[in-house]
Structures are given as C-alpha cells and as structure tokens.
Amino acid sequence: LNPITLMTKYGDFMRTASHSIEEVEDALGIPKKAKDILNTYWGYLGVPADDLNALHYLSMVGGFVRVPPCMPHHRSHQLSLALVDAIQRFGGEVRLNSEVTEFLFDEEGKAVGVTLAGGQKLTARKIVSNIIPNNVLNRWKGSVPPARTVKLANARKLGMTFVALYLGLDRSMEELGINDYSTFITLSGDSREQFDRRAEGGIYVVNCLNKTVPDCSPEGTCMLFFTILIMPGDMDDNMTPDQYKKFKNDYAIRYIEDYEKTLGVEIKSHIEEIVVATPVTFARYLGTPDGCIYGYANETWDNIIGRTATKDMDYNIPNLYYCGGHYIRGDGYPSAYITGDLTAQEVIKHLKEGK
C-alpha cells in the first residue's frame, strides 16, 4: 500500500501505529479505572501498557473477544502431538531429543545445515529456526556473521520470564473455595507499577486447570499453577545450591500465603505435590539466555510494527528463516503458529522461485 492509501483509507491505523496502548487510551479519554481493567492482559505480551504498542495489544484483546476460549484436553502437549502427527502425515521426519549444537554456513554466508549433539550433520536447502537468534550466533559455524545481525541481537532486550509454582492438592477446587480458572493478583491497577514492583509481588497469576479440564487430576483433587513475573537479571548470578533451594522455598511460601490471604482460602495443608520452576529451570530445558521465555521485549523501538517493517533487513541471511516467540510478532501460542505459517509460505515461495 502506498502512503496516501494508508492515510486516507486506514487513518486510524496510521494514527495509532507508533503509539503505546496508554497513549491511545489517554487520547480517547478513557477513565483510569477502565484503563486498568482493559490493560490487565499486558503480561501476556510482556511489556507494561506505557511501552506496549497499541495495535499489538488491541489485536490480542480483540481476538479474546471474537474467539471463544478453549483448552486442549491434554494441554500444550496435545498441540505438540498434533504438529508431530501433521508433519509425519505429510512425509516429514521428527527427531526428538536431538539438540542442534551448530548452525553451518558456507564461505558465502549461506546457511547450509546443522550439527546435532551426537555429531551428525544434516544439510538442507532451507533452514527454519525457532531458536532465539542469540543462540544461533553462539552456535554459528563457518563464515563471520553479518555485523547487523550481531548488533541487533546485542541491542535487543530479553523479554519476561517467570518463577512458576505447580501444586497438586488433595481437595477439589469446590471444596477449597476456588471458583475461577484464572485469577490475576496485583498490588496496583497500573501496569507500570505492577512491573516495577514485581519483586514485591506486583503481579502474579494463579490458574486452576480443573475449571476447564475437570479430569486433569483424580476426582476429589485439583491442580493450581502460579505464574510470577521475573525479568532476566533479577536473580543473583552467584547463588550456591543451598541459596537456590532457599530462593525457591521462600518464593513458594510467600506467594502461596499471599494467595490464601487475598482469596480467603486455605491450601497449604492440602498440598500433596509441589514443584518450583525458575529461570534456571527454563534455561536448562529451553537453552534460552537467562531462562528467557518471552523472546525479545516488545518495547516501543522494537515492537511488532517496527519488526515487520524491517524484517527483510533484519533477517536476510540466505537460506535461514525464523519463527516463534523471538520473531516479529513476539511471544504467544497464536504468534508462534502465525509466524510458523508465514515463514512456511515464504520458504515455499522461495523454493518455487529457485532462490
């Protein structure tokens, strides 16, 4: 679309494209209480409302309104199984527990393959990575990476991560007085204050899976999981094993007690099983820098609009493509699938064109 068409036909888009959700709300005269309610889901994108692109956030909330919520019976694992099944039905091969330790590039800087942990090298005409670019650079084997790629990875800020508590309780949710699937608990209605006071419990979310999947645990029991905001760098880098154990125990006790006090329920005496995961856990299993889950922060200078506009400049290594939460649309299941689909279409187009 040319600029004149954008301004005349899509004026609202142009007026809001470069602004934060809070700036747009203020321009519309939305009262503070309504703003605080509307901005509740900022944590799903990982950036407070005063720094979060309005179009990105509104498109997400609009999706919540238009599309009824649902939960796969076997949760995210069922989605993974469905993807594996689809790949295999179309003649593809899936290798589990096969870590990529090297991305291989020829002398011209073109991606040509990968090396697996066992030493096996796999070559391909096109490579799609859902590994964060920081790790691709750390596993780069061959010609020197482009300077722009290195500068971009260093300039970007890593997004949110979490401390997560998983609880198995010996009573049903009804017996415990738990009524909702998802409960947001905050110290303030203001998203910036929630973020800045994260070390004080500024915001956390508690979900009871039994509300949507009643048989996810045996009859007469229920499951709770706590999602507690923490940013890369918030944890002490030099914890001893004993200090790390204390960190996890202190977090669990603190947030369980706060949840009990806030909701007027008692769950501590009903805990049969508990697991605490931290950014260290996520770094171990995901391999992401600092245990980052949300890819790169969708900040004002590095948001979905800017990433989309500069995609061809930022991701221009021949034969190497990206998808996932660190890519142009940021984190989230829909973003992961949408970028996967868009990237697949781009790869197919390039293959047909002989590129």
Image (cartoon, rainbow, N blue to C red):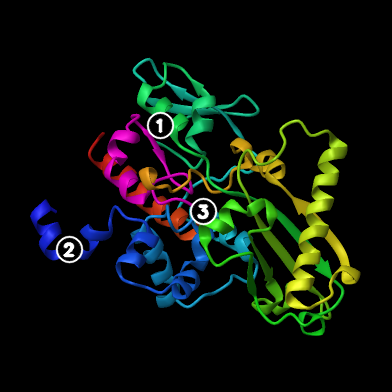
What percent of the width, then of the height, locates residue 203?
Answer: 62, 61
Specify the amino acid type for callout 3. Gly
* Residue position marked by numbered label 3 in the rendering: 46
Specify the amino acid type for callout 2. Gly
Horizontal arrangement in the rendering, residue 119 relative to residue 123 (left or right): right
Q: Residue 352 appears in which quarter of the rendering? A: top left
Horizontal arrangement in the rendering, residue 131 relative to residue 275 (left or right): left
Q: Are marks 3 and 1 in contact (CB under 8 Å)?
A: no
Q: Is residue 310 magenta?
A: yes
- In the rendered image, the quadrant that contains the N terminus is bottom left
What percent of the width, then of the height, locates residue 180?
Answer: 66, 79
Above or below, comparing residue 115 to residue 96 in the picture: above
* Residue position marked by numbered label 2 in the rendering: 11
Q: Specify start and end residues of the magenta stretch as a single range.
A: 303-331
Badge number at residue 152: 1
Above or below, comparing residue 2 to residue 130 in the picture: below
Badge 2 density bin: few <14, some 14–19, many ≥20, Cα 10 Å: few
Nearer to me, 280 or 183: 183
Q: What distance separates the C-alpha of mark 2 from that of mark 3?
A: 27 Å
Badge 1 density bin: few <14, some 14–19, many ≥20, Cα 10 Å: few
Asked whether the viewer can see residue 230, the reply is yes
Q: Is residue 93 magenta?
A: no
What percent of the width, then of the height, locates residue 64?
Answer: 45, 72
Asked whether the viewer can see residue 2, the reply is no
**Going 76% across and 30% down the picture, which residue do you hit?**
238
Q: Residue 201 appears in which quarter of the rendering? A: bottom right
**Going 83% across and 33% down the picture, which residue do you hit?**
240
Specify the amino acid type for callout 1. Leu
Horizontal arrangement in the rendering, residue 348 relative to residue 269 (left or right): left
Between tags 2 and 1, which lies in front? 2
